[in-house]
Image: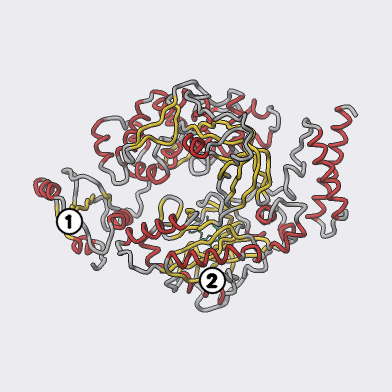
Amino acid sequence: MNKKKIESEYKKKIKLIIKYNKNYYDVSNPLVTDKVYDDLKKSILNLEIKYFFLNSENSPSKTVGFKPSKNFKKIAHRVPMLSLSNAFGKEDLINFEKKILNFLSKNRKFNLSYSTEPKIDGISASLMYKNGEFKTGLSRGDGKEGEDITANLATIKDIPKKIDLKDFPEEIDIRGEVFIQNSDFENLKEKFANPRNAASGSLRQKNPNDTKKIPLKFIAYTFGYEKGLKIRNQIDFLRKLNDWGFKTNPLNKLITGVENLLTNYNKIEKNRTKIDFDIDGIVYKINDFDLQKRLGNVANAPRWAIAHKFASNKAISKILNIEIQIGRTGALTPVAKIKPVNIGGVIVSNATLHNEDEIERKDIRIGDLATIERAGDVIPHILSVDKVKRDNKLLKFIFPKICPSCGSKTIKEFNNITKREDAVRRCTSEGYDCEKISIEKLKHFVSKDAFNIDGFGKKIVENFWKLNLIRLPQDIFKLDFKKIEKLEGWGKQSMENLKYSINQRKNISLERLIYSLGIRHIGLENAKILSKYFKSFSKFISFSNEAILDDILNIDGIGGTQLKSIKNFFDNKVNLNILKELQKILKVKDAIINNKNGLLNEKTFMVTGKLSGISRAEVKSLIEVNSGTSVSTVTKKLNYLIVGEKPTKKKVDKAKEFKITILNQSQFLKMLNVSS
Ligand code: IVH
């Protein structure tokens, strides 16, 4: 057969499978038997393996089930949907508890109780109820804004549509997981890669009748916004959910102490396969709502909860190559290209090797047989290599001493905190001088927590870079859309969509903008702190004078490492130019200072000495919640010095010299109407 003939044969088959797929979801009666469908699917996959030039968006190798729609209305969550930090073992749990006790200033003997909830691997949703009626249902989206999938959620039987009970709050967002039971997935196996994909795909159908055909389930576990909720802890809340008609996880339990958490974890992990839905770990939440409130959040995740992941699935495969990836901050990360292997339903062909030291320590070589581990949504990594089976011709891997992208020297920095050389080797070039770093910086710029440009994914950044369409962040706002429309795989509609998403993001908060710049050591939390300090983009841009530098160091949360990195950023002419260009294009909203009417509005505080029953971190968070600022040095501008036990004499003397008001702990708490 010649190429043309093969292609036309292939296209015919693709057309047919589109038709079958459509019928499977649109009409109750599928057009063909499962066997006919499977054979067609197999023959398409076989053709693709045989002839590399065959490729279609609609191939079953690319699509899972029927195509999900992108056109849902976006609605802001009244309370953001957070994610969870992960723990992988006892040590992480001990640390988690230690941090909580420190924050709450409790001693080690204090008993913390946790609501422990097996973590279902599905799709989270937020259901808004008003006067007992289900009004709107949103997907998680980016955590701040979700998609309006009300009609699809309404097809799920487990979701109560009307709750006529006196103790049901006047308004509440009930949150939980939409998923498919493994037994139900058996019948969907041919259409989707795994139960999670099936749940996600069917929830995002344009036509709710398509969603209805998939037996989706809903389990509730938390709430967002509420008005009139009279419950004090998580376990009681879960019980109440049942009373109100929601399903909850039957394996939820109240547990005290890390040892008991581990016993429960081991028991559930052992019986994991006997449960009729996929769980990828156990969520631990501090049970008491008052403690949760005191603990608050860091960036995207609560301080009071963690997901204890199950040890994953493992597989053995051959290391075909070791490639060096260059990250946004110049870090050289080795990645093992492995012979594709199925680990727990996902085909894995890359595994991270972390850094140079890791390769050295585990003596990993190209050609080795390696054990690869994949835990939940974490990037697969190499556990060990089989040295017995190793061919003795295999050479030790030599880590590159120059950057494979730009040829600059690579170095391991000396870490002033650990007093040791870093494990990570870095390219020494200045940001945008190195091609790979530039590409990664641009990917970061458009990513979810940064500019969040819909449809501008990593692949598009790479593609546009190759085509010379983008080099610096400002180029994103000056794209030649006529050219894009004519590119392969693009058309009028997709071009218009991209143009629209880019234009939409020209209005941006200062916090997001600072984060988007990808300044090393300035993550979401620090970007927020800096935005509150600078307040406006123009102030941020005219950063570089020395007085500001000193002042910045005085902000709690910004240390020497961050300061050095910010300084480096502003010392670079390319960066200054980027800021100037962005200023011309963007409309940057001034930082919103939380709750301007807070009791400590515009006042600065500093603590010296040990306080009783309350940690420094909590004092800081209390100050901020009440619109005050917490600083780290005594200057003339300081308003209050809070003095605890054994204060630093120098600080108190300085405060007296500057005539700063000195408070003891109870005087400070009184300012907040909190009793000590
Ligand atoms: S609580 C504020 N509870 O895990 C805490 N999440 O990584 C955030 N999940 O997006 C949610 N079971 O999809 C919570 N019992 C449970 C959960 C659970 C599964 C998922 C949820 C969330 C993700 C966080």
User: Disc 1 designates what residue?
Assistant: 643
Viewer can see residue 597: no
Neighbours of disc 2 within 10 Å: few (<14), some (14-19), many (20+): some
Residue lying furthest bottom: 166
- Quarter of the image with the N terminus in it: top right
Q: Which residue is mark 2?
A: 131
Q: Amino acid at mark 1?
A: Val
Check if mark 1's residue and mark 2's residue have beta carbons within 8 Å: no
Q: Which of the pair 104/360 is nearer the observer?
A: 360
Question: Could you tell which of marks 1 and 2 lies nearer the N-terminus?
Answer: 2
Density class for disc 1 (Cα within 10 Å; few <14, some 14-19, many ≥20) is many
Q: CA distance from mark 1 to mark 2?
A: 48 Å
Image quadrant in which you'd find residue 63: top right
Does residue 576 sit above or below 229 in this rendering?
above
- Residue 497 drawn at (x, y percent): 63, 38
| Image quadrant in which you'd find residue 340 | top right
Q: Amino acid at mark 2?
A: Asn
Q: Does residue 381 appear in this view? A: yes
Say if 614 sits above or below 35 in the image.
Answer: below
